[in-house]
Image (spheres, rainbow, N blue to C red):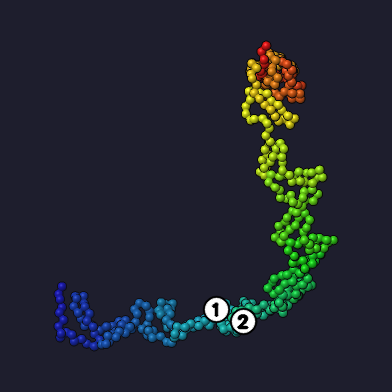
Amino acid sequence: MAVTRITPVDISVSDAYIIVGDSNGVGSLVEMSGDATIDNTGAITVEGISGTGIDPAFLAVSDGSIIVGDGMGAAAVVSMSGDVSIDNTGATTVNDISGTGISPGFLSLTDGQILIGNAGAATDTAMSGDVSIDSSGVTTVNDISGTGISPSFMSLTDGQLLIGNAGTATDTAMSGDVSIDSSGVTTVNGITGTGISPSFMSLTDGQILVGNAGTATDVAMSGDVSIDNSGATTVNDISGTGIDPSFMSLTDGNILVGDSGGAAASVAMSGDATIANTGELTLADTAVTPGSYTLSSITVDSKGRITAASSGSGSGDTVVVNEVPSGTINGSNANFTTANTPTEGSLTLYRNGLRMIPGSGNDYQISGSTITYESGNEPETNDVHVCDYRYTPE
């Protein structure tokens, strides 16, 4: 590429000309033209905007006018009109709202007035009737149509309320059994038809209301039971039982026993048994020394207690185990016989593994070597029938 050297002599350029490189890379002096020009101070002036349809004359626009494209795509300087206008500061003003029926005059409303639709058109009207409104939007209820409530009742005297009277609300003070104050706190002054006097609304400590000939009477609870101001009751007696109030607390281990007069007496259990405060019963000791006895000889008193016991010296008795007594087992035979005569009290009789109880009215009786079953207890066919006993050989 050839290099063009610019010498000082070439630096002399005509007013408003500039040096522009050509296609060969050589700088040429040319005058700026087209959409913009330049002066010898370097100030550029835009003469047009190519391809936009904006005429250079439009670059200076009249006060309040705007540039709007026309149907041909060309920009036109026009004044904004119709519903909205604009000034040279760019501030817009709504002059109308087309199609709403709102007149431009309504865009400024009189204090306290509102727009109301009337046959499709908005009408500038003051709110009236039951409710009014001020310029800050605060509404005031002046009446409640159809309720019979007078506007003067919108402010009620302290402690009064509205009561219906023949369909009309009446400003009245609450009275009778209940009253009310301005904070809504109610006070019961009486209970009509109960016989309860308002003075009973405060009761003396520990007293209760008791009906007397249809009238509630303020009395203290007495007799068998009393009550304190916490509602805790105390049993002081149990009338008709003969139980003395002092027995409500019993000495450890004592019990209540009726005496000959039908009164309960607090006594300690004694004699053949004693009792602890846990309810545990202890039998009294006898003269018998606890332990095991061989071939024992015992003495039993009328209370069933063993009062004497001793071991025997050995009689040489023979013990028989699992002997089958002779006799027919068929459900009707009641008599069976052992091979030997059992020592008194030594026979133990089993039927199907169950021990039979001797004695009249029980399962069987024995006399000598003969066993006789009580009626209805006779062994059935195929029953297992065995006995154990001792006997003294001859």
Label 1: which secondary element: loop
CB under 8 Å between discs 1 and 2:
no
Residue that sits furthest to the front in the current view: 287
Q: Which mark is residue 336?
A: none
Determine the residue positioned at 67% across, 38% down: 282
Quadrant housing the C terminus = top right
Amino acid at circle 1: Ser
Relative horizontal placement of residue 265, taking residue 113 as reference (left or right): right
Res. 262 in view: yes
Q: CA distance from mark 1 to mark 2?
A: 28 Å
Q: Nearer the viewer, residue 52 or 105?
A: 105
Determine the residue positioned at 65% across, 17% down: 315
- What x and y, as percent, mark residue 102? 58, 80
Q: Nearer the viewer, residue 114 or 60?
A: 114
74 versus 385 height, above or below: below
Relative horizontal placement of residue 233, taking residue 65 as reference (left or right): right
Amino acid at circle 2: Asp
If you read the primary sequence from the N terminus, does the residue marked by circle 1 or circle 2 appear first? 1
Relative horizontal placement of residue 47, taking residue 131 as reference (left or right): left
* Mark 2, residue position: 134
Q: Which mark is residue 98?
A: 1
- What x and y, as percent, mark residue 338? 69, 15
Q: How many marks?
A: 2
Depth check, mark 1 against mark 2: the one in front is: 2
Q: Nearer the viewer, residue 331 or 158?
A: 331
Determine the residue positioned at 43% across, 82% down: 66
Residue 59 falls in image quadrant:
bottom left
Quadrant housing the N terminus = bottom left
Determine the residue positioned at 14% across, 83% down: 7
Determine crowd level at label 1: few under 14, some 14-19, many 20+ residues with C-alpha closer than 10 A.
Answer: few
